[in-house]
Image: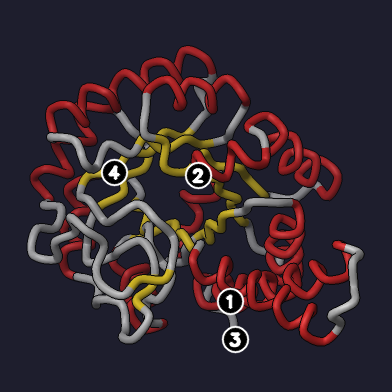
Amino acid sequence: MREVIKEAEKTKVAVGHFNISNIEGLWGIFRAAQSLKVPVIIGLSEGERDFVGVRQAVALVKSIRKEFDYPIFINADHTYSVERVKEAVDAGFDAVIFDGAKLPIEENIAKTKECVTYARSVNPDILMEAELGYIGTSSKLLDELPEGVSLEHLTTPEDAKRFVQETGIDLFSPSVGNIHGMLRNTKNPELNIARIKEIREAAGVPLVLHGGSGISDENFKAAIAAGISTIHINTEIRRAYREGIERALAENPDEIAPYRFMKPAQDAVGKVVFERLKLFNNRE
């Protein structure tokens, strides 16, 4: 995964990161990536891991990696405690995010450093990521900006540099105008592209863009050019999944076989992922 992200930076593309809650989401994402022959990262938040199973999620993704000899990786997304970071590290995740964005910076640094130290002691190859700058927590449809999110107080290059140097993280997630979730009745905010470039130069490690759902194609392209190497998408595929099931049941209201009415949901997820991966990888 480290080499994949390094290559993405070199070639000015971004690795797509997509969350799952079940196996049909996983197959939809994998088959979209496979059709384009590009790497992909599967993410699970704490809630998603609790539903799928922490070790079971790792086994699913790694079984696909082994069977197909494919660059598909698994990331423990948005982990809010040191204890749950340790759980993910011990389970064999390829990467883990400690999310202390709501904490004061001193506490965020201290807990992130503790997570990094533990992870390195268990698996020197694991990638550790952390966040500085609050962008919300839920991947859902929104009527307004998430509570506590301010577009006037973005992550600064100075804080980014200090944070990375003091914690030793491999990947850094800043607040640059991005939010978790999608606004229902208007476009999501514009990203601060100049700030992304400044943070990448100051931080010295690859940048991760969370809250990718609802961002314009033009903003994505500019963000990748400015230094974003990994992009997270969740709300868009959650919506596609639900709409796929709704359509299937509307067309066949008497259907009771889950694999039949979930197949359209899987296909809907794959379609969204395919288009996003084309964009992130500069494919026509």
Query: What whole-number distance in Å separates the C-alpha atoms at marks 1 and 2?
Result: 24 Å
Of the residues tagged 3 and 2, which is closer to the observer? 2
Residue type of the residue flagged with mark 4: Glu
Of helix, strand and loop, which one carries label 3?
loop
Secondary structure beneath label 4:
strand
Near mark 2 (Cα within 10 A), the count class, few <14, some 14-19 or many ≥20, is some
Q: Which residue is depicted at the point 60% across and 42% down?
A: 74
Residue 45 numbered tag:
2
Q: Closer to the N terminus: mark 1 or mark 3?
A: 1
- State which tag comes first along the sequence, 3 or 2: 2
Mark 1 surroundings: few (<14), some (14-19) or many (≥20) residues within 10 A: some
Figure quadrant of the N terminus: top right
Colouring mode (rainbow / by chain / secondary structure / one colour):
secondary structure
Quadrant of the image occupied by residue 107: top left
Q: Nearer the viewer, residue 87 or 183?
A: 183
Residue at 17% over, 69% down: 194
For the point 63% across and 51% down, the residue is: 21
Sequence-wise first label, 4 or 3? 4
- Please name which of the two marks, 2 or 4, marks the residue nearer to the observer: 2
For the question of whether residue 236 can be seen, the reply is: yes
Label 3 belongs to which residue? 284
Callout 2: helix, strand or loop? loop
Quadrant of the rendered structure where residue 83 is? top left
Q: Position of residue 142 (x, y in %)?
A: 35, 71
User: Looking at the image, do the residues carrying marks 4 and 1 touch, with CB atoms under 8 Å apart?
Assistant: no
Question: In the image, which is nearer the foreground, mark 1 or mark 3?
Answer: 1
Amino acid identity at mark 3: Glu
